[in-house]
Image (spheres, grey):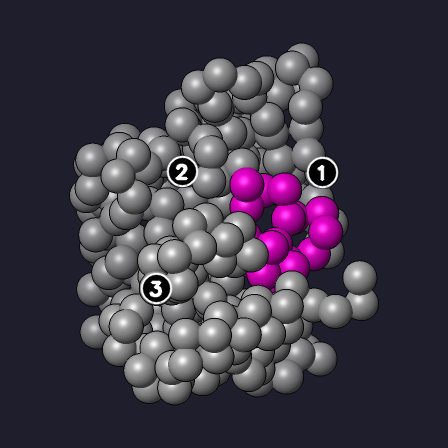
Amino acid sequence: MSESAAKRYADELRAWRASLKMTQKEFADRIDHSLALVAAVEQCVRAPTPTFARACDAATRAPGTFERWQVQVIEESYPAFFAPVVEFERSAARIHGWYLGAVPGLLQTADYARAIVRASRLTYSDDEIERTVDARTGRQEIVSSEHPPMLWYVIHEGVLRHVIGSPDVMAEQLDKLLAMAARPGIIVQLLPFSAPDHAGVEGPIEVYDFESAPSVGYTECHRGGRIVEAQTEVADLMVILSMLRAAALPVRESTALIRNVRSELR
């Protein structure tokens, strides 16, 4: 139990590659990924992405094996209180969220995520930071999957105006936010500074709807989070989200505000 999921994944990858009598370069060519990435995963410097894991499954003819291990690696990259959320995201049909501190993780750029992790995890080494960033950006593959969940986010205007990393990092993040908001099935609304007495002052909220299971909520505070399963509480969270949506700018005006803030960074 003391051995990390990342090390187990690396050990198994080396063992499978050895059984195939392939060098790292040959294996990298087989799975259509870079030699640098294969080496970094085997050294536990980088976290495997879902695409990398599926390619390993295909190359070793071990369907689902590396993909299951990859989920364990990703869950290990987060605090225990957040690990269940990774599975909620993977299986949800709809994700509703309210954010007042940062851009939602599923919409973050790697540089934006890196700046947040570096600022909030003061004791992390560079390798730990990169593994955490890989884990966060790896979760975003669900957005480009064949059947992605619908995303409906309300984001506070302060998230746009607080420069994370640098103006260039922030500009790239706002460009991505605009691009994602233009995609079908993704709704982004901005709660402006002018909105009075909004219902979301107590912190971020997410609610996950599933096709054949009750909805689940998630709330978070500093270094802590709570899974909400009682349906009366989930309903209360949806009321708060509904009030925030009613107070937020319409989608078109929200997009215009993002563009305006982006133009100020030039």
Q: Earlier in the sequence, mark 1 or mark 3?
A: 3
Between the C-alphas of marks 1 and 2, the distance is 19 Å
Q: Disc 3 and disc 2: Cα gap in Å?
A: 38 Å
Is residue 136 a member of the stretch shown in magenta? Answer: no
Which of 204/50 is in front? 50
Amino acid type indicated by mark 3: Ala
Dot 1 falls on a residue whose secondary structure is strand
Q: Position of residue 26 (x, y in %)?
A: 31, 82
Crowd band around label 3 with a 10 angstrom C-alpha radius: few (<14), some (14–19), many (20+): some
Quick check: 84 left or right of 148? right
Query: Which one is earlier in the sequence, the residue at label 3 or at label 2?
Result: 3
249 and 114: which one is in front? 114
- Residue matched to label 2: 153
Instruction: Give the residue displayed 56% in from the left and 56% down from the top.
Output: 69
Taking the spot 26% from the left edge, 39% from the top edge, the residue there is 146
Residue indicated by mark 1: 226
- Which mark's residue is nearer the viewer, 1 or 3? 3
Q: Which residues are magenta?
A: 71-87
Q: Main secondary structure of the magenta part?
A: helix
SS at circle 3: helix
Q: Is residue 72 magenta?
A: yes
Residue 106 in the image: above or below residue 26: above
Residue holding disc 3: 59
Q: Secondary structure at mark 2?
A: strand
Q: Nearer the viewer, mark 1 or mark 2?
A: 1
